[in-house]
């Protein structure tokens, strides 16, 4: 692991590009409606139950890592925009977009409007994504 001497964030690759901006989850949730705050809290409850997870709020999103980033989400005013990796392509609702990044991995994009949207299927995809990088 490489640790940036300026911001002390850790990365898999030396001199990996990143923003040294130091933000918190509260910065991302500032002035957001309670439904979005609750949605983020539910999402974080799910992923922090996985061993060795690090939450990394950066300038443009909140990243969830275990060695490598397996989940990234952006907090909007009326929803949470989420991207996660899987070792296969899943083309079913609520997945909105699938972007292959290699022959064995694809980024899956979806929108979460309410905490209830983080159902058992979404939890299983997040677990699968976590296992892919851990």
Image (tube, rainbow, N blue to C red):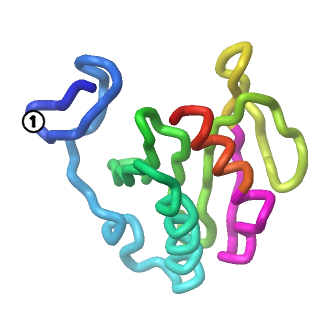
- Position of residue 95 measured from the top left corner of the image (x, y, whole percent): 80, 48
Q: Dividing the image into 4 quarters, which one contains the N terminus?
A: top left
Q: Does the magenta stretch include residue 62?
A: no
- Position of residue 64 measured from the top left corner of the image (x, y, whole percent): 46, 48
Q: In this view, does 55 lie to the left or right of 22?
A: right
Q: Which of 73 and 13 is in front in this view?
A: 13
Q: Which of 40 and 113 is in front in this view?
A: 40
Query: Residue at 40% across / 79% down in the picture?
Result: 31
In this rendering, does residue 61 appear at all?
no
The residue segment tinted magenta is 108-123
Q: Is residue 89 left or right of residue 38?
A: right
- Farthest top residue? 103
- Using the rendered view, name the quadrant where residue 133 is placed: top right
- Position of residue 83 measured from the top left corner of the image (x, y, whole percent): 62, 45
Q: Is mark 1 on a helix, strand or loop?
A: loop
Q: Is residue 127 left or right of residue 74?
A: right
In this rendering, does residue 120 appear at all?
yes
Q: Is residue 118 magenta?
A: yes
- Position of residue 76 measured from the top left corner of the image (x, y, whole percent): 54, 64
Q: How crowded is mark 1: few (under 14 residues within 10 Å), some or many (20 or more)?
A: few
The tally of labels here is 1
Q: Which of 88 and 108 is in front in this view?
A: 88
* In the depicted structure, whether residue 106 falls above or below residue 9: above
Q: In this view, does 102 lie to the left or right of 14?
A: right
Query: Residue at 35% across / 50% down in the picture?
Result: 56
* In the depicted structure, whether residue 36 falls above or below residue 21: below
- Farthest right residue? 92
Query: Residue at 74% across / 58% down in the picture?
Result: 122
Query: Residue at 30% across / 25% down in the picture?
Result: 17
- Farthest bottom residue? 34
According to the picture, the residue beneath numbered tag 1 turns out to be 6
- Farthest left residue? 5
């Amino acid at each position: 692991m490489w640790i940036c001497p300026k911001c002390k964030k850790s990365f898999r690759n030396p001199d990996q590009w990143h923003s040294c901006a130091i933000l918190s989850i509260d910065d991302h949730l500032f002035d957001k409606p309670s439904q979005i705050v609750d949605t983020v809290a539910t999402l974080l409850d799910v992923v922090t139950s996985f061993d060795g997870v690090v939450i990394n709020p950066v300038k443009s999103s909140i990243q969830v890592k275990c060695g490598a980033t397996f989940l990234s989400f952006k907090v909007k005013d009326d929803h949470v925009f989420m991207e996660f990796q899987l070792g296969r392509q899943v083309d079913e609702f609520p997945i909105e977009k699938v972007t292959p990044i290699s022959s064995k991995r694809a980024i899956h994009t979806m929108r979460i409007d309410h905490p209830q949207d983080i159902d058992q299927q979404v939890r299983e995809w997040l677990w699968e994504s976590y296992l892919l990088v851990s």
